[in-house]
């Protein structure tokens, strides 16, 4: 059994003027988001033994960059924790604020992060935002089993409200709603 600590990224620019700001391309953390990321350092002090899985989006990468500053822990970027629509809307489309970074952009801007290479390229292109519930269940099981193989005790996952809620619903088997979304830099600890 592994302990998963799901942490939502700090406040992003895409949340400042809803719903219009959701069309912001590549939003960064706000000043408040930077402060929130710094506060995670107090809640979850890191060591070199820790492993963090990160969504390939600027705001999650920045959150981890600030949180892990000065600690040489393992940071792995994976599209399997990228933004996910919750609940899934038929014919829903990925918004500009949720477009994934390319592997090259991650290597250029966040060079201390590893790229998770075993994931098929389709997910690196399109993410998991609009995959069907059936496909997500397969993805979730593979991802969680990969987490168990990667780390034997605790693993951190820095992601998004809909993604975290989707994984929580999968792990717990309980029906969740948007009311269950974590706030910025909130965390949920689960065992799998």
Image: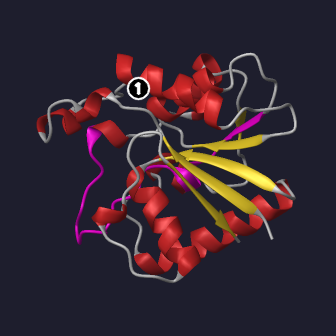
Determine which residue is flagged by label 1.
33
* Vertical comparison of 21 with 161: above or below: above
Looking at the image, which residue is at 65% across and 24% down? 107
Residue 48 sits in which quadrant? top right
The one of 157 and 88 positioned closer to us in this rendering? 157
Residue 71 sits in which quadrant? top right
The answer to whether residue 102 is magenta is: no
Which quarter of the image is occupied by the C terminus? bottom right
Does residue 53 appear left or right of residue 25 in this picture? Answer: right
The one of 185 and 121 positioned closer to us in this rendering? 185
Q: Position of residue 180 (x, y in %)?
A: 36, 64
The number of discs equals 1
Q: Give the range drawn in magenta.
A: 74-96
Q: Where is residue 9 in the image (x, y as percent from the top left)?
A: 47, 38
Does residue 112 appear left or right of residue 168 in this picture? Answer: right
Magenta: main secondary structure equals loop
The one of 125 and 33 positioned closer to us in this rendering? 33
The one of 79 and 157 positioned closer to us in this rendering? 157
* Vertical comparison of 60 with 173: above or below: above
Element under disc 1? helix
The answer to whether residue 88 is magenta is: yes
Residue sticking out furthest to the front: 42
Q: Is residue 30 visible?
A: no
Q: Position of residue 54 (x, y in %)?
A: 60, 41
Which quarter of the image is occupied by the N terminus? bottom right
Residue count near mark 1 (Cα–Cα under 10 Å), binned few <14, some 14–19, many ≥20: many
Q: Where is residue 149 in the image (x, y as percent from the top left)?
A: 85, 61
Does residue 175 appear left or right of residue 138 in this picture? Answer: left
Residue 67 sits in which quadrant? top right
């Amino acid at each position: 059994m592994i302990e998963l600590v799901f942490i939502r990224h700090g406040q992003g620019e895409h949340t400042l003027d809803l719903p219009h700001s959701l069309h912001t391309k590549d939003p960064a953390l706000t000043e408040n988001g930077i402060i929130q990321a710094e506060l995670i350092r107090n809640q979850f002090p890191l060591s070199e033994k820790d492993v963090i899985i990160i969504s390939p989006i600027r705001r999650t990468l920045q959150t981890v960059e600030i949180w892990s500053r000065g600690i040489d822990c393992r940071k792995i970027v994976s599209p399997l924790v990228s933004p996910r629509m919750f609940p899934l809307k038929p014919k829903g489309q990925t918004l500009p604020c949720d477009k994934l970074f390319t592997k090259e952009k991650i290597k250029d801007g966040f060079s201390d992060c590893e790229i998770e290479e075993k994931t098929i390229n389709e997910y690196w292109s399109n993410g998991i935002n609009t995959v069907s519930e059936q496909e997500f269940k397969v993805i979730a099981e593979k991802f969680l089993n990969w987490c168990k193989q990667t780390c034997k005790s605790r693993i951190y996952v820095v992601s998004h409200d809909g993604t975290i809620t989707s994984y929580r619903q999968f792990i717990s088997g309980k029906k969740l709603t948007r009311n269950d979304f974590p706030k910025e830099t909130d965390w949920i600890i689960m065992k799998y």
